[in-house]
Image: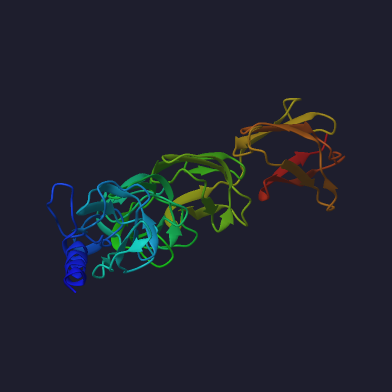
Amino acid sequence: MSKIILFVMILACTLSFGCSSGGSSKPVSIASGPAITATYPTNGGSGTLVTISGSNFGLVQSTSIVSYAGVTVIPVTWSDTQITLKVPDNAPNNGNFVVVVNGVYSNASVVFNLSNPAISYISPSTAAIGSDVTISGQYFGTFNSGCYVTFNNTTAAIKNWNNTSITCTVPEFSSSLSSTITVVVWIDAYRYSNSYSFNLTAPTINSVSPSSDNVGARIAINGQAFGQNQGTVTVGGYTAQIVSWLDTKVEFRVPPVNSAGWKTLTLTSGGRQVNNSFTVAAPEITSAFSSSGGNASNGNTFTIVGNNFGSSEDQITTSVQLRDESNNIYTPGITSSDTSIAFIWPVPNKLIGTQVVYITISVGGITNTNSYYVTAD
């Protein structure tokens, strides 16, 4: 009986304390899984540095992982009691952090509240279409295909993007708008920043040179904030052909209009308009003479001197029509410059008396008619 009691005591000693060759003993330790005790901070946006405190994370990361709202996060530092990481750009919404060590999951952290991106200021605060501006703020994250910036709902071209700063180009606008517009930073389809007011520089015309000319003539508009991309120019509501377009200078050709005289010139750039005045000049006759030195005579060269007949560079049609007293119409071939027109006189001379011949000059559809008296030979 005593042997049985002794065996039971030895077995109990072994199970409770363990035995060593030196005769000493210690408790048997049972491994525990990872445990999260705190996170700091508990709110922030993309790129926010978060510290997770706890135990049993392991001295090195190895194959262990940490996730936020189901998205695996690459840690910045890792130790047995502390992990630091940055909130990922693709974090879907508010969520918990979880640490997984050797397949064992920790408890979920307190909910981390995900903040939207925030614009602090834009520099410069006023700029023209086509200018580069810098948006400063926080929680912009790292640029990806879901990131963009809008100016009044028009997407801007991005030149540089990081968590606190974005450089982009003020876009062209398809419709007319006021001088103050709103800028919004989007980091995905659901998260976007506060709306920030931005002042758009209006196009300004300093001069129109020349301020009066015939249809087809090349005109220069000098000013600022016309934009880098081509807009439109109208004269009296008629669209002009653009020759060149720069931010400070636009060249166009006077379009065919319904009449000569004062017109409103309108330059439109990216939804912004500016008006000025322009005069469409009619052809003007100051004198006329025959090559014979006297009366116009059939077969002789007849020259008309004046202004606004159109130059060879004006890309318009200049023509001359003659009508005699019997309403016979003559359309001679001409050689012309901006100040003179020459042609062979086609109207037969009367045998007796004087006849009136009406000479009509047409330049790009704008006409001027003068009467010319021809005496009999």
Quadrant of the image occupied by residue 72: bottom left
Residue 335 appears in the figure: yes
- On the image, the x and y values in percent for residue 71 come to 39, 60
- On the image, the x and y values in percent for residue 176 come to 44, 62
Q: Residue furthest bottom?
A: 1
Q: Residue furthest front?
A: 1
The one of 337 and 133 positioned closer to us in this rendering: 133
Q: What colouring does the structure picture have? A: rainbow
Left or right: residue 59 versus residue 170 is left
Residue at point 16% right, 71% down?
2
- On the image, the x and y values in percent for residue 85 come to 27, 52
Q: Quadrant of the N terminus?
A: bottom left
Left or right: residue 205 versus residue 305 is left
Quadrant of the image occupied by residue 15: bottom left
Q: Residue furthest left?
A: 24
Quadrant of the image occupied by residue 105: bottom left
- On the image, the x and y values in percent for residue 337 come to 65, 31
Residue 295 appears in the figure: no
Does 149 appear above or below 160? below
The one of 289 and 153 positioned closer to us in this rendering: 153
The one of 150 and 366 positioned closer to us in this rendering: 150
Residue at point 45% right, 59% down?
154
The one of 299 and 362 positioned closer to us in this rendering: 362
Does 348 appear above or below 301? below
Number of numbered callouts drawn: 0
Left or right: residue 93 versus residue 304 is left
